[in-house]
């Protein structure tokens, strides 16, 4: 027990150092920061403006009004940003496998999965976080959400769960590189598919797709079910139930992904011969 | 000319070697195409014509936009960035062949390979799962083809101009992303500009982006009269000339700058 505690303290200590280092690397290239500061918010603010235009032309999407869509979109972008900060490495796992970069992690006395994700914390993810929060707040105001303790707890639990679901999916997809030995860049496509399935109401898809996105690839829990529950649309249960399910799904996905990663790592043979 | 044909040939062979990437791309693009089809179906539920277009034409638009997006993949900006970063640009410039001619030939080669690897499969999948994209008026076919060629050139020139920023800035990853998002949102590739507020739409119609996706696609689905299409193709041609001129000027300047950097 005492050992476990000491180990945990050690990991936290390393994490603090790593975050400090990440901030320092970012500050080193100011021109790059400027680029990402423009690029990331632009993407979401424009994406959101376009939803506004379309929804105003048509009135609603599948019964969801513009304000409700802003709420859904904001929730989705915030969890996207959090997953970008902690789990974006999953997108590039293929390169690490091909280039033999895991050698470095294997020689250190810390968990490989922990090192892989946390020594590469992506501070730039904050540039996604800001537009996400803005759109979410806008959605809350538009829908007249009453902010009370339950709501805040719901949002927090949902965001943790949603981030874990996204991160788990990145790890799962990235870990396929251990088996295929190819450096497919999943990032761009994963993001586009995630955007399409988490930023619009899931109920607009036919039932077969809804089933897949609820039970097999549980992206429905990232934003759709929690948002529906908090806003009281689509007849989804209100209260903490849905948020807790999201958290549960998130933990399950990340555990499966971790196991898959560790299994893949055994197949890892480094680069060269 | 023969030199460039050789580059095209090598690029085609190069593109053919990465099989797994091809299947991955097809699957991903199919998913994206189908989800956008459901997006439009949900919007059009219980509505007839919105923005002078009915649900059927919009689905044709979605399928064709996915098909067209395969043709409009450029690599020139990353190619420039890489060769500046690694310094190979200096030796590339010494070769008795125009640097940008090579980049253009490479992109042509990649696109030829993609026509068979991605475009045809996506067209077939789209026809089976969403809707057979029938042209509204077959007589517009020549117009459509010309506008597609022009849109390909405009798209490539914009990419090349962006890529040239790398000669001075070296790292343009973030800029490439900015360009990508701007292009996707302002060209009507996902959502046609005619759904935007009138003022915004008018501004966008004076920029070159809508002439990359939206013009060929509106000709295809028959939105607007032929006179309108011809007028818009006129604007498209003007943009092509402007961008080509900008490209030629920038090319001269950029080449000079690289020489200086090399010492």
Image: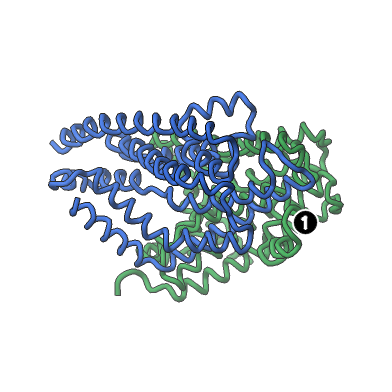
From the viewer's perspective, tell me whether residue A243 is left or right of residue A38. right
From the viewer's perspective, tell me whether residue B251 is left or right of residue B192. left
Residue B245 percent location from the top left of the image:
30, 30
Which quadrant is the C terminus of chain A positioned in? bottom left
Residue A107 in view, yes or no: no
**Vertically, is A223 above or below A259?**
above
Residue B33 percent location from the top left of the image:
59, 55
Report helix, strand or loop for mark 1.
helix
The residue that appears at 55% across and 71% down in the rendered structure is A260
Q: Specify few, some or many for label 1: CA neighbours under 10 Å numbering under 14, 14-19, or 20 or more.
A: some
Nearest to the observer: residue B143 or residue A35: B143
The residue that appears at 34% across and 31% down in the rendered structure is B241
Colour that chain B carries in the picture = blue
Which chain is represented by green in the image?
A
Chain bearing mark 1: A
**Vertically, is B61 above or below B198?**
below
Q: Residue furthest front?
A: B139
From the viewer's perspective, tell me whether residue B57 is left or right of residue B117. right
Q: Quadrant of residue B43?
A: top right
Residue tagged 1: A244
Residue B166 in view, yes or no: yes
Q: Quadrant of residue A245?
A: bottom right
What is the basis of the colouring in this image?
by chain
Residue B104 percent location from the top left of the image:
29, 47
The residue that appears at 16% across and 33% down in the rendered structure is B260
The residue that appears at 50% across and 67% down in the rendered structure is A175
């Amino acid at each position: 027990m005492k050992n476990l505690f000491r180990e945990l303290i050690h990991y936290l200590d390393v994490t603090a150092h790593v975050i400090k280092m990440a901030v320092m690397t970012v500050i080193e290239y100011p021109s790059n920061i400027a680029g990402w500061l423009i690029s990331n918010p632009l993407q979401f603010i424009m994406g959101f403006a376009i939803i506004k235009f379309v929804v105003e032309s048509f009135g609603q999407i599948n019964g969801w009004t513009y304000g409700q869509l802003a709420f859904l979109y904001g929730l989705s972008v915030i969890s996207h940003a959090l997953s970008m900060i902690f789990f974006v490495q999953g997108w590039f796992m293929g390169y690490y496998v091909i280039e033999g970069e895991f050698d470095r992690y294997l020689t250190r006395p810390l968990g490989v999965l922990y090192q892989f994700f946390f020594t590469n914390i992506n501070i730039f993810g904050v540039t996604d976080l800001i537009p996400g929060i803005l759109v979410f707040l806008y959605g809350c105001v538009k829908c007249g959400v009453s902010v009370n303790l339950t709501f805040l707890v719901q949002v927090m639990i949902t965001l943790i769960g949603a981030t874990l679901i996204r991160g788990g999916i990145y790890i799962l997809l990235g870990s396929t590189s251990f088996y295929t030995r190819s450096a497919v860049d999943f990032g761009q496509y994963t993001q586009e598919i995630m955007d399409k399935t988490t930023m619009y109401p899931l109920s607009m898809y036919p039932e077969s797709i809804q089933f897949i996105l609820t039970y097999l690839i549980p992206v429905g829990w990232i934003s759709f079910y929690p948002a529906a529950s908090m806003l009281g649309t689509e007849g989804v249960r209100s209260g903490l139930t849905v948020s807790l399910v999201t958290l549960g799904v998130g933990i399950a996905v990340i555990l499966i992904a971790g196991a898959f990663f560790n299994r893949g790592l055994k197949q890892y043979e480094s680069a060269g011969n | 000319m023969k030199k460039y044909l050789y580059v095209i040939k090598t690029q085609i062979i190069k593109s053919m070697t990465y099989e797994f990437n091809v299947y991955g791309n097809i699957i991903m693009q199919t998913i994206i195409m189908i989800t956008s089809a459901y997006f439009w179906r949900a919007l059009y539920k219980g509505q007839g014509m919105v923005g002078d277009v009915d649900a059927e034409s919009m689905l044709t638009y979605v399928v064709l936009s996915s098909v067209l997006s395969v043709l409009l993949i450029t690599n020139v900006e990353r190619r420039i960035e890489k060769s500046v970063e690694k310094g190979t640009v200096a030796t590339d410039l010494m070769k008795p062949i125009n640097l940008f001619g090579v980049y253009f030939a490479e992109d042509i080669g990649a696109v030829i390979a993609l026509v068979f690897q991605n475009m045809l499969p996506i067209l077939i999948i789209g026809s089976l799962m969403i809707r057979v994209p029938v042209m509204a008026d077959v007589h517009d076919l020549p117009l459509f083809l010309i506008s597609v060629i022009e849109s390909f050139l405009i798209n490539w020139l914009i990419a090349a101009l962006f890529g040239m920023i790398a000669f001075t800035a070296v790292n343009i990853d973030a800029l490439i992303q900015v360009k990508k998002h701007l292009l996707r949102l302002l060209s009507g590739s996902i959502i046609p500009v005619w759904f935007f507020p009138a003022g915004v739409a008018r501004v966008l119609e004076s920029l070159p982006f809508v002439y990359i996706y939206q013009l060929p696609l509106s000709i295809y689905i028959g939105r607007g009269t032929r006179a309108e299409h011809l007028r818009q193709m006129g604007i498209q041609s003007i943009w092509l000339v402007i961008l080509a001129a900008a490209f030629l000027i920038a090319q001269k300047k950029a080449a000079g700058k690289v020489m200086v950097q090399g010492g």
